[in-house]
Image: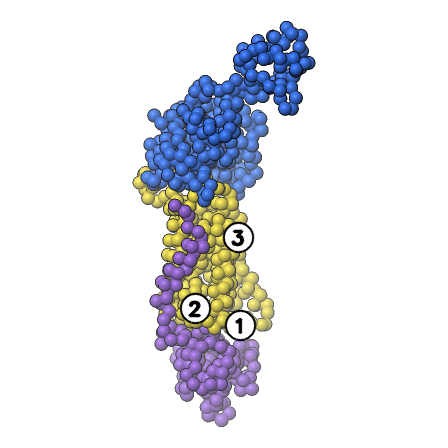
Chain colours: A blue, B purple, C yellow
């Protein structure tokens, strides 16, 4: 079962190509990541899924429906694009009641429940104009849950939150994933996607560079990158050359940069120790998935399509 | 597909409005001498009667239009209007209209010619101002002892610019 | 409510939501309140002064009949007030969603774009009707209560008894409704296409003023008949001895044409728009 199926999706804004033939599949009952740097086309893609933007070409199927089939298209779909927005002159509760009225059906009876769920009960009577970004994000999730969605589409829900807020938001998302929701989570943070998602679509400049499980991604990932400073960097570099699997280079801002998995790194530090070279700093620069992400999204065009599937 | 620009949409809307409305507004000029003369004559006579009732004190208790009042004056000497001094088939709004109206002099009991200066607006409403030497000041003291508006000093009227 | 009823009255749901939003904003309530109260201030000012606003129809009669002042207020309101007042809400009702970034909030619920267009337009129209009704009630009440219910001398110089005068004053105010709804449609269209409340409100107000100014210059009569401000004068036909209704009929047709054309254009715009922001 697929919750979202996108094929060959294209969209131009004037001369700007926002989506250049995007393919994406979001399986049912999973938290699926949509990852890419700013300007990769994530937001445009999400807006197409909500029917806010009409694509130039390609097919979109959300929970089995296509957008040209009228306004029932969004049935069972909820969420927000960019940061959620509300009427600042109404209270949080009043905003939710208004949206519940727009939805009709059973939504109005769920207002209390969703306010409780996202932890806004104490501030529900305050005007949204006075809400912090984090509270608005939580209200956005509450507004989405009102619709009893089968698919939740969330755009950078942790954006602008402080560390505690990010932790709370991730716990909330993890809970949603575990209770069987299908969640499409847009993010520019590999770490967040890795900790929450089982599968991921990675975009750059309007194209998909990876669409599949996190496991597949890990298999392709290069070794993590580290920064190393020693008492004698020159000799440390010489020693590294004796270990052919190790990729070590002089870092432009001093010290050495090393690509190695944990086992190789252990062996190398042991070698340094035996050679009497003191280690002054050893620090993880990028995890292996982050390394892959920057390779996929920053490298010149050859990666586009090459890493696909 | 590209979005229609607001300008284009508005141009189409404006054009359609012109085409739709164009059928409604045909015919001759709105402001004609015949229309003005037809309106200002009867208005003047009616206001003369209002003025008489103010002076005689019957206005407050018995409005002139409500019941037939025996001493209401009718005199149907036709008014005669000119525009910019031209006594031809004139038309159009402006402040240069003048109308000769007739009213019964209380002294000689004959009809006296009064010339009113008339400003006609494009919408068919006009303001006529008479010579205060003849028609009196803006305010007059009524039979009830109170100050009243002198209806003949200056008066407004409107006529139909579409029908006959 | 059953499912089919809910879908069929989707625009009604949007309409009710919009009314909730409008009445929750203090400035909307303040305007409506002012529409009712301002005529009382006007009548009070007349009562305390000896001079009359003689440059407006019925202005010279304000001290002689309490039915003259509501017609003077109507003259002022139709010339300068209504185009602006009608567009304060209409010119903002779509662009406020751009300002608050809430298009996505309402468009990702269960209501379609057409339902939102109809619901919002009806809400703006309701507000405009409320503006006219409250101003009419305020003027008539303030005239009668503060200045009296003496007979009103009509535009043919004939005094009308109080009951008849009151009815004609109410009818006269009612003739303002069609062009006010035309201006409402203009405000709605500007609000939707410019996506900016200042442009939405001022754009339609400036057009109203230009139309009003045209009425003072000696331009071709045909154009004057097509303007949305001309129907505002159609009440003159009620207040003469031989009533004429041609301007009223023409005004209804012109106002309806503006509403139909502008709303059709708005429909095309909202159906085709890409909501890339807000």
Q: Nearer the viewer, residue A25 or A255?
A: A255
Q: Residue at x 48, y 39 (%)?
A: A95
Residue A275 horizontal/vertical position (percent): 65, 7
Marked residue chain, label 2 = C
The single residue placed furthest to the bottom in the displayed view is B108
Marked residue chain, label 1 = C
Between discs 3 and 1, the one toward the N terminus: 1
Residue A142 horizontal/vertical position (percent): 47, 32
Disc 3 from disc 1: Cα separation: 32 Å
Mark 1 — residue? C55
Mark 2 — residue? C224
Between discs 3 and 2, the one toward the N terminus: 3
**For residue C198, which numbered disc appears in the image?**
3
Left or right relative to A232: residue B93:
left
Comparing marks 1 and 2, which lies closer to the viewer?
2
The single residue placed furthest to the top in the displayed view is A274
């Amino acid at each position: 079962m697929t919750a979202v199926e996108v094929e060959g999706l294209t969209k131009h804004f004037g001369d700007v190509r926002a989506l250049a033939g995007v393919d994406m599949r979001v399986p049912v009952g999973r938290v699926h990541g949509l990852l890419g740097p700013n300007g990769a086309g994530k937001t445009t893609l999400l807006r197409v899924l909500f029917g806010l933007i009409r694509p130039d070409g390609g097919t979109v199927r959300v929970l089995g429906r296509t957008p040209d089939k009228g306004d029932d298209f969004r049935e069972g779909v909820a969420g927000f694009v960019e940061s959620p927005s509300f009427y600042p002159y109404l209270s949080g509760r009043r905003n939710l009641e208004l949206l519940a009225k727009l939805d009709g059906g059973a939504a109005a009876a769920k207002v209390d429940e969703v306010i409780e769920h996202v932890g806004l009960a104490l501030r529900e009577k305050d005007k949204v104009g006075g809400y912090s970004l984090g509270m608005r994000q939580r209200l956005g999730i509450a507004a989405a849950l009102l619709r009893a969605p089968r698919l939740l589409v969330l755009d950078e829900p942790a954006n602008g939150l402080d560390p505690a807020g990010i932790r709370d938001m991730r716990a909330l998302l993890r809970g949603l994933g575990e209770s069987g929701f299908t969640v499409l989570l847009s993010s520019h943070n590999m770490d967040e996607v890795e900790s929450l998602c089982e599968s991921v679509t990675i975009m750059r400049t309007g194209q998909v560079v990876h669409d599949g499980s996190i496991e597949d991604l890990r298999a392709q990932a290069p070794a993590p990158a580290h920064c190393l400073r020693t008492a004698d960097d020159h000799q440390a570099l010489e020693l590294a050359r004796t270990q052919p699997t190790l990729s070590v280079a002089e870092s432009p801002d001093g010290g050495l940069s090393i690509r190695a998995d944990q086992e190789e790194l252990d062996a190398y530090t042991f070698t340094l120790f035996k050679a009497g070279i003191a280690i002054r700093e050893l620090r993880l620069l990028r995890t292996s998935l982050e390394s892959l992400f920057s390779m996929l999204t920053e490298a010149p065009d050859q990666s586009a399509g090459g890493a696909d599937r | 597909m590209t979005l229609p620009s607001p300008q284009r949409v508005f141009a189409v809307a404006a054009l359609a409005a012109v085409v739709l409305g164009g059928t409604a507004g045909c015919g001759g000029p709105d402001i004609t001498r015949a229309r003005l003369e037809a309106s200002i004559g009867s208005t003047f006579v009616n206001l003369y009667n209002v003025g008489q009732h103010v002076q005689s004190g019957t206005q407050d208790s018995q409005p002139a239009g409500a019941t037939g009042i025996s001493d209401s004056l009718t005199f149907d000497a036709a008014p005669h209007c000119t525009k910019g001094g031209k006594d031809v088939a004139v038309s159009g709004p402006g402040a240069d209209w003048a109308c000769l109206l007739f009213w019964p002099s209380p002294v000689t009991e004959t009809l006296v010619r009064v010339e009113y200066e008339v400003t006609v607006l494009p919408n068919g409403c006009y303001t006529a101002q008479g010579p205060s030497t003849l028609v009196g000041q803006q305010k007059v003291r009524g039979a009830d002892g109170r100050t009243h508006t002198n209806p003949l000093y200056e008066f407004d009227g409107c006529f139909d610019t579409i029908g006959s | 409510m059953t499912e089919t009823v809910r879908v069929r009255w989707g625009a009604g749901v949007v309409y009710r939501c919009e009314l909730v939003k409008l009445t929750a904003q203090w400035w909307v309530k303040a305007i409506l309140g002012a529409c009712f109260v301002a005529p009382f201030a006007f009548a009070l000012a007349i009562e305390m002064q000896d001079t009359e606003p003689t440059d407006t129809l019925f202005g010279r009669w304000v001290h002689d009949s309490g039915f003259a002042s509501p017609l003077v207020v109507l003259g002022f309101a139709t010339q300068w007030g209504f185009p602006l007042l009608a567009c304060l809400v209409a010119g903002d009702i779509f662009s406020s969603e751009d300002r608050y970034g809430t298009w996505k909030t309402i468009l990702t619920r269960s209501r379609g774009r057409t339902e939102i267009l109809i619901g919002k337009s009806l809400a703006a129209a309701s507000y405009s009707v409320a503006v006219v009704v409250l101003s009419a009630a305020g003027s008539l009440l303030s005239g009668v209560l503060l200045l009296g219910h003496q007979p009103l001398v009509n535009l043919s110089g004939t005094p009308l008894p109080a009951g008849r005068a009151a009815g004609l004053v109410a009818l006269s105010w009612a003739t303002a409704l069609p062009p006010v709804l035309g201006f409402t449609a203009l405000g709605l269209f500007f609000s939707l296409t410019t996506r900016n409340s200042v442009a939405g409100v001022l754009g339609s107000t400036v057009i109203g003023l230009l139309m009003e100014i045209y009425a003072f210059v000696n331009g071709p009569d045909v154009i004057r008949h097509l303007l949305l401000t001309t129907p505002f004068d159609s009440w003159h036909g009620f207040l003469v001895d031989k009533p004429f209704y041609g301007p009223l009929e023409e005004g209804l047709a012109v106002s309806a044409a503006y509403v139909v054309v502008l709303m059709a254009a708005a429909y095309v715009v909202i159906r085709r728009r890409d909501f890339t922001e807000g």
